[in-house]
Image (cartoon, helix red, strand yellow):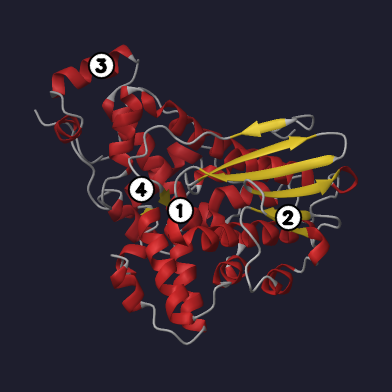
Amino acid sequence: MSSLTANMSAIQLQRPLSLPATTVHPTYARALCMLMRQHGVAAEPALALAGLSEAVLASDDQPVTLQAVTQLALQALQVTGKPWLGLALGRVVHASAHGLVGHAALTSRDLRELLQTVARYGGLRTDAFRFSWTEDGAGGALKVQNTCDLGPARQFVVDAVFSTLLVLLENGTGQRPNGLTAVLPFVPPPWRAAYCEHTGLDEAHLRFGGDALSLHLPTAILPTTCITADARAHQAACRSCDEMLGRSITSATVAGRVRKVLEQAAPGGFPTLEDVASALHRSPRTLMRQLQREGVRYMRLLDEVRKARALSDLCEGRDTVETIAARLGFVDTSNFSRTCRRWFGQTPGAIRAGSAPLPVLAATGDDGAGPDEQPVARVRR
Protein backbone atom coordinates (compact mmCIF):
# COMPACT_ATOMS: atom_id res chain seq x y z
CA MET A 1 0.00 0.00 0.00
CA SER A 2 1.40 3.43 -0.96
CA SER A 3 2.02 5.99 1.75
CA LEU A 4 0.04 8.47 -0.33
CA THR A 5 -3.70 7.77 -0.38
CA ALA A 6 -5.46 7.60 -3.71
CA ASN A 7 -8.23 9.96 -2.68
CA MET A 8 -5.90 12.72 -1.54
CA SER A 9 -7.35 15.90 -3.01
CA ALA A 10 -4.74 18.44 -1.99
CA ILE A 11 -1.12 18.14 -0.97
CA GLN A 12 1.15 21.05 -0.21
CA LEU A 13 4.74 21.20 0.93
CA GLN A 14 5.63 24.31 2.85
CA ARG A 15 9.05 25.89 2.68
CA PRO A 16 11.39 24.52 5.37
CA LEU A 17 11.58 26.96 8.26
CA SER A 18 15.27 26.98 9.10
CA LEU A 19 17.06 27.30 5.78
CA PRO A 20 19.28 30.40 6.02
CA ALA A 21 19.22 30.80 2.22
CA THR A 22 17.30 29.31 -0.67
CA THR A 23 19.26 26.34 -1.92
CA VAL A 24 19.43 23.94 -4.87
CA HIS A 25 20.97 20.48 -5.13
CA PRO A 26 24.35 20.76 -6.97
CA THR A 27 23.36 18.15 -9.57
CA TYR A 28 21.35 20.79 -11.46
CA ALA A 29 24.31 23.16 -11.66
CA ARG A 30 26.45 20.27 -12.92
CA ALA A 31 23.87 19.58 -15.64
CA LEU A 32 23.92 23.23 -16.67
CA CYS A 33 27.70 23.12 -17.02
CA MET A 34 27.38 20.00 -19.17
CA LEU A 35 24.81 21.74 -21.37
CA MET A 36 27.09 24.75 -21.83
CA ARG A 37 29.90 22.47 -23.00
CA GLN A 38 27.51 20.75 -25.41
CA HIS A 39 26.96 24.18 -26.96
CA GLY A 40 30.72 24.66 -27.33
CA VAL A 41 31.12 27.04 -24.39
CA ALA A 42 33.60 26.58 -21.55
CA ALA A 43 31.83 26.45 -18.20
CA GLU A 44 34.78 27.44 -16.00
CA PRO A 45 34.62 31.23 -16.56
CA ALA A 46 30.87 31.24 -15.86
CA LEU A 47 31.42 29.19 -12.70
CA ALA A 48 34.05 31.65 -11.49
CA LEU A 49 31.79 34.64 -12.07
CA ALA A 50 29.04 32.87 -10.11
CA GLY A 51 31.42 32.17 -7.20
CA LEU A 52 31.39 28.43 -7.90
CA SER A 53 33.92 25.84 -8.99
CA GLU A 54 34.01 22.27 -10.26
CA ALA A 55 35.25 21.17 -6.82
CA VAL A 56 32.24 22.74 -5.08
CA LEU A 57 29.79 21.12 -7.49
CA ALA A 58 31.50 17.74 -7.17
CA SER A 59 30.21 17.39 -3.61
CA ASP A 60 26.76 15.86 -3.15
CA ASP A 61 26.78 16.87 0.53
CA GLN A 62 26.43 20.63 0.31
CA PRO A 63 23.53 22.39 -1.43
CA VAL A 64 24.33 25.37 -3.63
CA THR A 65 22.67 28.71 -3.00
CA LEU A 66 20.00 29.69 -5.48
CA GLN A 67 21.77 33.02 -5.92
CA ALA A 68 24.90 31.25 -7.19
CA VAL A 69 22.89 29.02 -9.53
CA THR A 70 20.94 31.94 -10.98
CA GLN A 71 24.19 33.82 -11.56
CA LEU A 72 25.53 30.76 -13.37
CA ALA A 73 22.31 30.60 -15.42
CA LEU A 74 22.57 34.26 -16.44
CA GLN A 75 26.16 33.71 -17.55
CA ALA A 76 25.10 30.63 -19.50
CA LEU A 77 22.31 32.57 -21.23
CA GLN A 78 24.71 35.32 -22.18
CA VAL A 79 27.54 33.19 -23.56
CA THR A 80 25.30 30.72 -25.45
CA GLY A 81 22.91 33.32 -26.80
CA LYS A 82 20.02 30.86 -26.37
CA PRO A 83 17.17 32.32 -24.28
CA TRP A 84 15.39 28.92 -24.24
CA LEU A 85 18.33 27.25 -22.45
CA GLY A 86 16.19 26.48 -19.41
CA LEU A 87 13.90 24.31 -21.53
CA ALA A 88 16.93 22.47 -22.90
CA LEU A 89 18.31 21.96 -19.40
CA GLY A 90 15.16 20.17 -18.27
CA ARG A 91 15.45 17.75 -21.19
CA VAL A 92 19.01 16.68 -20.35
CA VAL A 93 18.50 16.15 -16.60
CA HIS A 94 17.96 12.42 -16.15
CA ALA A 95 15.30 11.30 -13.69
CA SER A 96 17.97 9.70 -11.49
CA ALA A 97 19.39 13.19 -10.87
CA HIS A 98 16.41 13.91 -8.62
CA GLY A 99 17.63 11.41 -6.02
CA LEU A 100 15.15 9.83 -3.63
CA VAL A 101 12.43 12.21 -4.80
CA GLY A 102 12.78 11.05 -8.40
CA HIS A 103 12.90 7.43 -7.25
CA ALA A 104 9.69 7.87 -5.26
CA ALA A 105 7.95 9.54 -8.22
CA LEU A 106 8.97 7.02 -10.85
CA THR A 107 7.99 3.99 -8.77
CA SER A 108 4.46 5.39 -8.30
CA ARG A 109 1.48 3.22 -9.20
CA ASP A 110 -0.01 5.61 -11.75
CA LEU A 111 0.12 9.16 -13.08
CA ARG A 112 -2.04 10.53 -10.25
CA GLU A 113 0.25 9.08 -7.58
CA LEU A 114 3.33 10.32 -9.44
CA LEU A 115 1.97 13.88 -9.40
CA GLN A 116 0.97 13.59 -5.75
CA THR A 117 4.48 12.40 -4.94
CA VAL A 118 6.08 15.34 -6.76
CA ALA A 119 3.76 17.72 -4.91
CA ARG A 120 4.62 16.27 -1.51
CA TYR A 121 8.38 15.88 -1.89
CA GLY A 122 9.45 18.23 -4.71
CA GLY A 123 10.57 20.90 -2.25
CA LEU A 124 13.18 18.53 -0.81
CA ARG A 125 15.37 19.23 -3.87
CA THR A 126 15.04 23.00 -3.54
CA ASP A 127 13.13 25.34 -1.28
CA ALA A 128 12.86 27.90 -4.10
CA PHE A 129 9.44 26.49 -5.02
CA ARG A 130 6.26 25.32 -3.31
CA PHE A 131 4.52 22.41 -5.03
CA SER A 132 0.81 21.61 -4.67
CA TRP A 133 -1.65 19.15 -6.23
CA THR A 134 -5.40 19.68 -6.43
CA GLU A 135 -8.23 17.79 -8.12
CA ASP A 136 -11.78 18.66 -9.13
CA GLY A 137 -14.38 17.10 -11.40
CA ALA A 138 -12.51 18.06 -14.57
CA GLY A 139 -9.05 16.81 -13.61
CA GLY A 140 -6.00 17.67 -11.57
CA ALA A 141 -3.43 20.47 -11.47
CA LEU A 142 0.18 20.49 -10.28
CA LYS A 143 1.04 24.06 -9.31
CA VAL A 144 4.61 25.28 -8.78
CA GLN A 145 4.99 28.65 -7.07
CA ASN A 146 8.34 30.32 -6.40
CA THR A 147 8.88 31.17 -2.75
CA CYS A 148 11.45 33.91 -3.38
CA ASP A 149 12.38 36.54 -5.93
CA LEU A 150 14.17 34.76 -8.78
CA GLY A 151 15.29 38.05 -10.33
CA PRO A 152 16.29 38.26 -14.00
CA ALA A 153 16.81 34.48 -14.10
CA ARG A 154 13.14 33.81 -13.32
CA GLN A 155 12.11 32.68 -16.81
CA PHE A 156 15.16 30.42 -17.15
CA VAL A 157 14.48 28.75 -13.79
CA VAL A 158 10.75 28.32 -14.42
CA ASP A 159 11.46 26.92 -17.90
CA ALA A 160 13.91 24.40 -16.42
CA VAL A 161 11.39 23.25 -13.79
CA PHE A 162 8.64 23.02 -16.44
CA SER A 163 10.75 20.94 -18.82
CA THR A 164 12.03 18.74 -15.98
CA LEU A 165 8.49 17.92 -14.86
CA LEU A 166 7.45 16.96 -18.39
CA VAL A 167 10.43 14.61 -18.69
CA LEU A 168 9.56 13.04 -15.35
CA LEU A 169 5.98 12.40 -16.50
CA GLU A 170 7.21 10.94 -19.79
CA ASN A 171 9.71 8.66 -18.05
CA GLY A 172 7.08 7.44 -15.63
CA THR A 173 4.34 6.65 -18.13
CA GLY A 174 6.42 6.00 -21.23
CA GLN A 175 4.62 8.75 -23.15
CA ARG A 176 3.71 12.40 -23.04
CA PRO A 177 0.38 12.58 -21.16
CA ASN A 178 -2.43 13.12 -23.65
CA GLY A 179 -4.44 16.27 -23.00
CA LEU A 180 -1.88 17.94 -20.73
CA THR A 181 -2.03 21.74 -20.74
CA ALA A 182 0.73 23.94 -19.32
CA VAL A 183 0.31 27.47 -17.96
CA LEU A 184 3.42 29.64 -17.68
CA PRO A 185 3.70 32.73 -15.43
CA PHE A 186 4.95 35.27 -17.97
CA VAL A 187 4.00 36.82 -21.29
CA PRO A 188 4.85 34.90 -24.47
CA PRO A 189 8.48 35.59 -25.43
CA PRO A 190 9.54 36.29 -29.03
CA TRP A 191 10.93 32.78 -29.18
CA ARG A 192 7.72 31.08 -28.01
CA ALA A 193 8.05 28.49 -30.80
CA ALA A 194 10.90 26.96 -28.78
CA TYR A 195 8.34 25.82 -26.21
CA CYS A 196 6.63 23.62 -28.78
CA GLU A 197 9.98 22.34 -30.04
CA HIS A 198 11.39 21.41 -26.64
CA THR A 199 8.22 20.18 -24.93
CA GLY A 200 6.27 18.61 -27.78
CA LEU A 201 3.16 20.56 -26.76
CA ASP A 202 1.23 22.45 -29.42
CA GLU A 203 0.09 26.06 -29.14
CA ALA A 204 -3.37 24.97 -27.98
CA HIS A 205 -1.89 23.33 -24.88
CA LEU A 206 0.50 26.16 -23.99
CA ARG A 207 -0.85 29.20 -22.16
CA PHE A 208 1.01 32.24 -20.90
CA GLY A 209 0.23 34.88 -18.30
CA GLY A 210 -0.70 32.65 -15.36
CA ASP A 211 0.04 33.48 -11.73
CA ALA A 212 2.36 30.46 -11.43
CA LEU A 213 3.66 27.50 -13.41
CA SER A 214 0.97 24.81 -13.52
CA LEU A 215 0.29 21.55 -15.34
CA HIS A 216 -3.34 20.59 -15.91
CA LEU A 217 -4.38 17.02 -16.72
CA PRO A 218 -7.85 15.63 -17.47
CA THR A 219 -9.33 13.08 -15.07
CA ALA A 220 -9.38 10.35 -17.73
CA ILE A 221 -5.58 10.05 -17.90
CA LEU A 222 -4.79 10.20 -14.17
CA PRO A 223 -5.14 6.39 -13.74
CA THR A 224 -2.51 5.80 -16.46
CA THR A 225 -0.19 3.09 -15.12
CA CYS A 226 3.47 3.98 -14.65
CA ILE A 227 5.75 1.63 -16.56
CA THR A 228 8.28 2.00 -13.74
CA ALA A 229 5.78 1.19 -10.97
CA ASP A 230 7.16 -0.75 -7.99
CA ALA A 231 4.98 -0.70 -4.88
CA ARG A 232 7.66 -1.83 -2.39
CA ALA A 233 10.30 0.52 -3.75
CA HIS A 234 7.79 3.38 -3.79
CA GLN A 235 6.80 2.78 -0.17
CA ALA A 236 10.44 2.63 0.95
CA ALA A 237 11.36 5.78 -0.98
CA CYS A 238 8.34 7.69 0.38
CA ARG A 239 9.19 6.71 3.95
CA SER A 240 12.76 7.96 3.44
CA CYS A 241 11.46 11.20 1.94
CA ASP A 242 9.02 11.57 4.85
CA GLU A 243 11.95 11.29 7.23
CA MET A 244 13.76 14.06 5.36
CA LEU A 245 10.59 16.14 5.23
CA GLY A 246 9.98 15.68 8.93
CA ARG A 247 13.43 17.01 9.71
CA SER A 248 12.71 20.14 7.65
CA ILE A 249 9.31 20.79 9.20
CA THR A 250 10.54 20.33 12.78
CA SER A 251 13.60 22.51 12.25
CA ALA A 252 12.03 25.29 14.34
CA THR A 253 12.95 23.26 17.44
CA VAL A 254 16.36 23.43 19.09
CA ALA A 255 17.02 19.88 17.90
CA GLY A 256 16.12 20.97 14.37
CA ARG A 257 18.57 23.86 14.51
CA VAL A 258 21.30 21.57 15.82
CA ARG A 259 20.57 19.14 13.02
CA LYS A 260 20.83 21.91 10.44
CA VAL A 261 24.27 22.90 11.74
CA LEU A 262 25.37 19.26 11.53
CA GLU A 263 23.94 18.87 8.02
CA GLN A 264 25.85 21.93 6.84
CA ALA A 265 29.16 20.62 8.18
CA ALA A 266 31.93 20.31 5.61
CA PRO A 267 32.71 16.75 4.44
CA GLY A 268 35.21 14.99 6.68
CA GLY A 269 34.58 16.91 9.88
CA PHE A 270 31.51 17.16 12.08
CA PRO A 271 31.41 19.84 14.79
CA THR A 272 31.56 19.07 18.48
CA LEU A 273 28.74 19.98 20.83
CA GLU A 274 30.75 23.04 21.87
CA ASP A 275 31.09 24.11 18.23
CA VAL A 276 27.35 23.73 17.65
CA ALA A 277 26.53 25.62 20.85
CA SER A 278 28.78 28.47 19.74
CA ALA A 279 27.10 28.56 16.31
CA LEU A 280 23.71 28.80 18.03
CA HIS A 281 24.94 31.49 20.45
CA ARG A 282 24.50 29.59 23.71
CA SER A 283 26.65 27.66 26.15
CA PRO A 284 27.14 23.88 25.77
CA ARG A 285 25.40 23.32 29.10
CA THR A 286 22.37 25.36 28.01
CA LEU A 287 22.22 23.52 24.69
CA MET A 288 22.35 20.12 26.40
CA ARG A 289 19.56 21.18 28.78
CA GLN A 290 17.38 22.43 25.91
CA LEU A 291 17.90 19.21 23.96
CA GLN A 292 17.06 17.17 27.04
CA ARG A 293 13.76 19.02 27.38
CA GLU A 294 12.94 17.97 23.79
CA GLY A 295 13.87 14.36 24.60
CA VAL A 296 16.90 14.30 22.27
CA ARG A 297 20.63 13.83 22.80
CA TYR A 298 23.38 15.40 20.72
CA MET A 299 24.97 12.07 19.75
CA ARG A 300 21.62 10.80 18.50
CA LEU A 301 21.29 13.81 16.18
CA LEU A 302 24.85 13.34 14.97
CA ASP A 303 24.19 9.68 14.27
CA GLU A 304 21.03 10.48 12.30
CA VAL A 305 22.82 13.09 10.18
CA ARG A 306 25.66 10.68 9.41
CA LYS A 307 23.08 8.02 8.57
CA ALA A 308 21.19 10.26 6.14
CA ARG A 309 24.42 11.44 4.52
CA ALA A 310 25.63 7.87 4.14
CA LEU A 311 22.41 6.82 2.40
CA SER A 312 22.48 9.84 0.09
CA ASP A 313 26.12 9.27 -0.86
CA LEU A 314 25.61 5.56 -1.50
CA CYS A 315 22.40 6.00 -3.52
CA GLU A 316 23.22 9.16 -5.43
CA GLY A 317 26.95 9.85 -5.16
CA ARG A 318 29.82 8.76 -7.37
CA ASP A 319 32.57 8.33 -4.76
CA THR A 320 33.94 4.98 -3.64
CA VAL A 321 32.78 3.35 -0.42
CA GLU A 322 36.22 4.03 1.05
CA THR A 323 35.95 7.74 0.28
CA ILE A 324 32.44 7.96 1.74
CA ALA A 325 33.54 6.16 4.92
CA ALA A 326 36.45 8.55 5.40
CA ARG A 327 34.26 11.58 4.74
CA LEU A 328 31.83 10.43 7.42
CA GLY A 329 34.64 10.04 9.94
CA PHE A 330 34.99 6.24 10.07
CA VAL A 331 38.46 4.88 10.72
CA ASP A 332 38.09 2.13 8.10
CA THR A 333 35.57 0.59 5.72
CA SER A 334 34.90 -2.44 7.93
CA ASN A 335 33.76 -0.09 10.70
CA PHE A 336 31.55 1.73 8.19
CA SER A 337 30.15 -1.56 6.90
CA ARG A 338 29.17 -2.70 10.41
CA THR A 339 27.44 0.61 11.04
CA CYS A 340 25.53 0.41 7.73
CA ARG A 341 24.25 -3.02 8.72
CA ARG A 342 23.05 -1.54 12.02
CA TRP A 343 21.46 1.45 10.29
CA PHE A 344 19.95 -0.20 7.21
CA GLY A 345 20.31 -3.95 7.58
CA GLN A 346 22.52 -3.95 4.46
CA THR A 347 26.17 -3.52 3.57
CA PRO A 348 27.30 -0.39 1.68
CA GLY A 349 27.89 -2.52 -1.41
CA ALA A 350 24.34 -3.92 -1.35
CA ILE A 351 22.84 -0.44 -1.02
CA ARG A 352 24.90 0.88 -3.93
CA ALA A 353 24.17 -2.15 -6.11
CA GLY A 354 20.43 -1.87 -5.45
CA SER A 355 20.23 -5.62 -4.85
CA ALA A 356 17.68 -5.11 -2.06
CA PRO A 357 14.80 -2.64 -1.46
CA LEU A 358 15.93 0.90 -0.76
CA PRO A 359 16.69 1.29 2.98
CA VAL A 360 14.29 3.28 5.13
CA LEU A 361 15.58 6.05 7.35
CA ALA A 362 14.28 5.38 10.84
CA ALA A 363 14.95 6.99 14.18
CA THR A 364 17.95 5.75 16.10
CA GLY A 365 18.26 5.07 19.78
CA ASP A 366 19.15 7.81 22.21
CA ASP A 367 22.87 7.35 21.99
CA GLY A 368 22.97 6.67 18.28
CA ALA A 369 26.40 5.09 17.95
CA GLY A 370 26.77 1.39 18.52
CA PRO A 371 29.38 -0.16 20.79
CA ASP A 372 31.67 -1.22 17.93
CA GLU A 373 31.80 2.20 16.23
CA GLN A 374 34.34 4.94 16.55
CA PRO A 375 32.20 8.03 15.90
CA VAL A 376 33.61 11.43 15.23
CA ALA A 377 32.95 14.71 17.04
CA ARG A 378 32.53 13.41 20.58
CA VAL A 379 31.83 16.10 23.14
CA ARG A 380 34.99 17.58 24.61
CA ARG A 381 35.41 16.80 28.25
The foreground one among 274 and 349 is: 274
Q: Nearer the viewer, residue 328 or 192?
A: 192
Identify the residue position indicated by label 1 in the image: 150
Residue 47, located in which quarter of the rendered image?
bottom left
Mark closer to the observer (3, 4)? 3
- Which of the labelled discs sits on residue 182, or is there none? 2
Q: At 78% from the left edge and 33% from the top edge, which residue is drawn?
A: 6
Reading the image, the residue beneath label 4 is: 336
Choose the circle earlier in sequence order: 1 or 2: 1
On the image, the x and y values in percent for residue 197 come to 72, 74
Residue for point 43% across, 56% down: 151
Q: Where is residue 202 in the image (x, y as percent from the top left)?
A: 80, 67
From this viewpoint, which residue is outermost toward the left? 381
Question: Hey, what amino acid is under mark 1?
Answer: Leu
Measured from the top left, where is residue 175 in percent x and y? 81, 63
**Residue at 44% from the left image edge and 53% from the top image edge:** 24
Q: Which amino acid does label 3 sit on?
A: Gln
Mark linked to residue 290: 3
Q: Is residue 174 above or below residue 101?
A: below
Distance between mark 1 and mark 2 Cα atoms: 20 Å
Q: Along the line of sight, which residue is nearer the eye, 319 or 93?
A: 93
